[in-house]
């Protein structure tokens, strides 16, 4: 459905217009049209294709969705795919924003998210000096809004990792810790797949042969590039910390198993000594001198207790019991 359809000229909004009027405003000099769609049908996209003369391949990508983040150039226009990532509790939602940008138009198509770009429209309309740059500045504002949404996600993942680290050293449910760490690693990979392809693509918007629609706005796209690098570096750090946390968790499991093994070995030693003595005393050979001793039985019991007591003190001293 159509969320907004407005015309702008000389940095100011002329007003909301009908779809049928788009072609008339596109003919005006220094005027551009900004249309926002949400989960459009193929018929609505076809109408937009005819109004803005969009490339069929770009329209097909926007229609099918599930595209890799990218920035494609078609003549004097650009087609961009961005992934919108939102955290809802412990779950990560992935949505998609497709942006068609030409010298006199901007068409944004969002799918799978209720979080719109009203704030972006209000921001650009409050800055007429920048809005005079035309569709290129609107394109920057949309990209900047999507990239800025990555930072809260990174912060939330950092908090999640800190909680998992506390659980690791608290000794609670090592198996669940491993599962949660792998879930966190998966979230990091999803975010990385949304960020990494855009770094090189965004670099082309301000360095080298800059597309026509981005002329005059190169410093703004360089700012987006810097933000993407910051997110990428933060993800690298988190990934390394997750790998370290997994190794620590496995080491804690090994240490716990060693503690159990030492305890079992200690108890086995305490049982082995009485068993050894009782086994020897129980061999009823005719010429065993201790069979005729009056104090043989209490001496055997006393020897068992003495040796076990000495072993017990030794095991307690070294921390095995």
Image (cartoon, grey):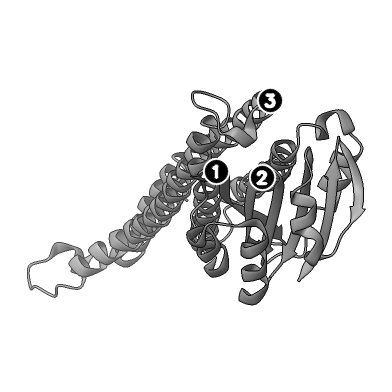
Spatial distance from mark 2 to mark 1, Cα to Cα? 9 Å
Place of residue 300 in the rendered image (x, y in percent of width and height, measured from the top left) = 31, 61
Q: Secondary structure at mark 1?
A: helix
Residue annotated with mark 1 = 195
| Residue pictured at 65% horizontal, 54% vertical | 84
| Residue pictured at 53% horizontal, 24% vertical | 207
Q: Secondary structure at mark 3?
A: loop
Place of residue 308 in the rendered image (x, y in percent of width and height, measured from the top left) = 39, 54
Spatial distance from mark 2 to mark 3, Cα to Cα? 26 Å
Residue annotated with mark 2 = 150
| Nearest the eye: 317 or 133 | 133
> In the rendered view of the protein, which quadrant contains the N terminus?
bottom right
| Residue pictured at 37% horizontal, 54% vertical | 266
Spatial distance from mark 1 to mark 3, Cα to Cα? 24 Å
Place of residue 46 in the rendered image (x, y in percent of width and height, measured from the top left) = 62, 70
Question: Which of pointers 2 and 3 lies earlier in the amino acid sequence?
Answer: 2
Q: Relative to 164, is 138 on the left or the right?
A: right
Q: What label sits on residue 216 in the rendered view?
A: 3
215 versus 135 height, above or below = above
Q: Residues within 10 Å of mark 1 (few under 14, many from 20)?
A: many
- Is residue 295 something that shows in the picture? no
Question: Which of pointers 2 and 1 lies earlier in the amino acid sequence?
Answer: 2
| Residue pictured at 86% horizontal, 35% vertical | 10
- Is residue 20 something that shows in the picture? yes
Q: Residues within 10 Å of mark 3 (few under 14, many from 20)?
A: some
Quarter occupied by residue 137 = top right
Task: Please say if the residues under marks 2 and 3 sit with CB atoms less than 8 Å apart.
Answer: no
Task: Please say if the residues under marks 2 and 1 sit with CB atoms less than 8 Å apart.
Answer: yes
Q: Residues within 10 Å of mark 2 (few under 14, many from 20)?
A: many
| Nearest the eye: 187 or 145 | 145
Place of residue 295 in the rendered image (x, y in percent of width and height, measured from the top left) = 32, 63
Question: Which of pointers 1 and 3 lies earlier in the amino acid sequence?
Answer: 1
């Amino acid at each position: 459905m159509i969320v907004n359809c407005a015309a702008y000229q000389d940095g100011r909004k002329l007003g909301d217009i009908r779809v049928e009027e788009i072609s008339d405003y596109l003919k005006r000099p220094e005027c551009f049209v900004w249309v926002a769609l949400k989960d459009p049908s193929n018929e609505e996209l076809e109408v937009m294709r005819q109004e803005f003369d969009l490339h069929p391949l770009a329209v097909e990508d926007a229609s099918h969705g599930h595209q890799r983040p990218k920035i494609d150039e078609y003549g004097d226009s650009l087609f961009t795919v961005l992934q919108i990532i939102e955290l809802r509790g412990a779950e990560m939602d992935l949505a998609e924003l497709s942006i068609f940008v030409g010298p006199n138009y901007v068409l944004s198509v969002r799918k799978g998210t209720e979080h719109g770009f009203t704030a972006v429209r209000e921001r650009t309309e409050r800055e007429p000096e920048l809005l005079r740059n035309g569709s290129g500045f609107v394109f920057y504002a949309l990209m900047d809004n999507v990239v800025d949404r990555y930072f809260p996600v990174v912060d939330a993942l950092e908090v999640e990792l800190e909680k998992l680290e506390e659980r690791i050293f608290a000794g609670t449910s090592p198996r669940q810790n491993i599962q949660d760490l792998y879930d966190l690693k998966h979230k990091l990979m999803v975010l990385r797949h949304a960020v990494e392809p855009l770094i090189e693509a965004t670099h082309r918007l301000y360095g080298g042969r800059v597309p026509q629609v981005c002329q005059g706005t190169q410093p703004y796209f360089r700012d987006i590039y810097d933000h993407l690098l910051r997110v990428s570096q933060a993800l690298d750090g988190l990934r390394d910390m997750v790998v370290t946390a997994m190794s620590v968790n496995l080491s804690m499991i090994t240490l716990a198993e060693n503690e159990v093994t030492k305890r079992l070995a200690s108890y086995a030693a305490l049982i082995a000594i009485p068993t050894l003595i009782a086994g020897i005393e129980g061999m009823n050979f005719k010429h065993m001198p201790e069979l005729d001793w009056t104090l043989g039985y209490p001496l055997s019991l006393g020897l068992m207790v003495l040796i076990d007591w000495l072993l017990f003190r030794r095991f307690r001293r070294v921390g095995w019991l």
